[in-house]
Amino acid sequence: MEPILFIVFGAIAVGGAIMVVTRRHPMSSALFLILTLFAVAALFVLRQAHFLAAIQVIVYAGAVVVLFIFVIMLINVPENKLPLERLTGFRFLGIMVAGLFILEAALVARRFATPGTPTADSGSVEAVGRALFTDYLLAFEVTSVLLLAAVIGAIALAKKRI
Amino acid sequence: MAPISIDAAALLTSVQSIVPEIIVVATAIFVLLLDLAISEEKKHLLCGMGLLGIGVALFSVYALGQGRIEGFSGMIVHDGMGAFFDVVILSACALTFLMATGYSEWEGTHKGEFYSLILLSTSGMMFMAKGTDLMTVFLGLETLSIPIYVLVGFHRNRMSSLEGALKYFLLGAFASGFLLYGIALIYAVTGTTKIPVLATMLYDPRILASPLFLAGTGLLLVGFAFKVSLVPFHMWTPDAYEGAPTVVTAFMSAAVKAAAFAALIRVLLVALPGMQPVLWKVLWGLAVLTMTVGNLSALVQNNVKRLLAYSSIAHAGYILVGLVSGDVLGGQASLFYLLVYAFMNMGAFGVVMLIAQKEDEGYDIANLAGIGFKYPALGALLTLFLISLGGIPPTAGFVGKFYLFSAAVKNGYIWLAVIGVLNSAASIYYYLRMVVYMYMVTPDVEVAVPRPPRILFSMALCASAVVVVVLGIIPRSVLEIAERSVLSLLM
């Protein structure tokens, strides 16, 4: 059952990602991005990373893409003003390099990667929480400093009068 | 699962290992809150409180000493190396605060946010320099970078400031991505992000030869190279340095570089000595490229800030020379040079800041004309800092370069030393060009009137000058501390 699910969700993720970069209207791109993120969340579930899957849906699909959509709606470019994309030299080069990279990654993954088998509860909320507040306590605290810095910075840049 | 038991003694040691960082973060928060409570005329208090906090933090580093204190299950360590870089970073931060006293009045940046962002960035640098886990290094890097992105764009009404900030932010975000991807690949192969554990994993030749691991190391290097602006990852440097408020430029050039190099040195010397046979070629190439491109580009600059930006790229190349061999001698030379560089470069930026009256126009090299005789103190100070940057005795810059290049020679990288010395000779041209403008060019209009420095500002310049001269004449004790610091890594 698992390999079938993997192929199905993997295909949805890759297909969605291709649609994200090929759609002309940014709104369709954003919606396809949500699809991709959901499919990736499903892949996380298959790898027993339940916490990560939930976070993926809540943070990325829920918060980040919603922000994208807000911005797209605020800018509101009419359909006929959207730039027409052509296959320029640079884009062609980009596709070539991307193809090469995929080939390389596939080769490396086939020959050298040794995936470990996740235990049933290694990705549960409890396990992640436990790690976060014991071994990774410092990382957790430094992240709070980082967020404080980001908030102060955003206000300093955006406030009307400082 | 069993409830988590708290080991009080371990927690105490953990807290002990990050006392200086805690003090800096607490000061940042205090300054931010104080900003709300005091009236407009008393804003200079913010700077004073900041300086007090830095002083206490420096004292705590001194009290902790160079002994090894490991904390938070091996995420961070206070050792000789950490103490050394804590001192370098905190000194750069203190100089920034001293220089900000006058600067913020001229440019109207007297804001609590300015000081707390500098302090938060400083705390990030200290976490990065002391991190023994790639996670800590990455989080430290982000904590130092995000305030800097904001500070570069702090003059929200100036196009160049915003342009520099946006470029730095976009490229910086990519570089962080590279670094994180590198860490992820290394984790995928070895199953660990702890730097000392990585070193033991590398005894396994299968891991060493694994393409995933090589790719991870490469991406990690790209991330670091971006932060210390090695060629070809230096494109953002001139624009960000030119656009940023000059105080911030000075801070970036000294402190960010020191922190990023600290983490790079830790990774290279502790985690990757097994990679040395492969890695030295990459580092060799990067060092040569960085020195040469940095110096050649600096030759043609007429804007003093851009000139110093390219010179700082070239200096990153010199410092990398010490890391090519991956031994104690080179590491010691790099550490010493990073300390000296912080003082001489911040000093040079400080004088330039006084001479330029306006943010945008004042930095043309022609503006220096005639300064030397009309304002002898400023002229003498700038000359001192410039000849130190150029590496002419009896300044600390000379001693630093001497040790860097002699470490290269002793380890058999003769050509690297030769290229470095040639580069250093070329760099003297553009440093002396500024001196020539100050003393030998008669100004077209009238001599620029420098801004009268505040007493704290003068103190910053004098302190930098004293460090540059004293370390140029009696460098021994500091060199010994640097050596002990590098040795503390290898224990």
Image (spheres, coloured by chain):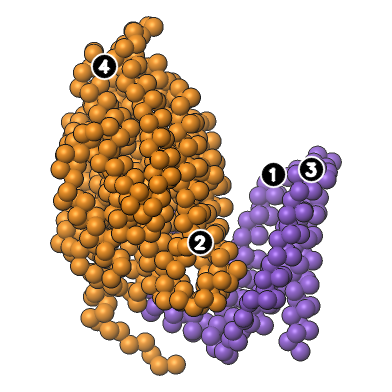
Q: Earlier in the sequence, mark 1 or mark 3?
A: 1
At 78% across and 84% down in the image, what residue appears? A4
Q: CA distance from mark 3 to mark 2?
A: 35 Å
Q: Position of residue B174 (x, y in %)?
A: 57, 52
Q: Position of residue A83 (x, y in %)?
A: 80, 41
Q: Amino acid at mark 1?
A: Ile
> Dot 4: within a 10 Å radius of its alpha carbon, few (fewer than 14), some, or many (20 or more) residues?
many
Q: Amino acid at mark 4?
A: Gly
Q: Tell me the shade of chain A.
A: purple
Q: Is residue B113 visible?
A: no
Q: Are marks 1 and 4 in contact (CB under 8 Å)?
A: no
The residue carrying mark 4 is B372
Q: Are marks 2 and 1 in contact (CB under 8 Å)?
A: no
Chain letter corresponding to the colour orange: B
Q: Secondary structure at mark 2?
A: helix
Q: CA distance from mark 1 to mark 3?
A: 29 Å
Q: Position of residue B436 (x, y in %)?
A: 33, 17
Q: Are marks 3 and 4 in contact (CB under 8 Å)?
A: no
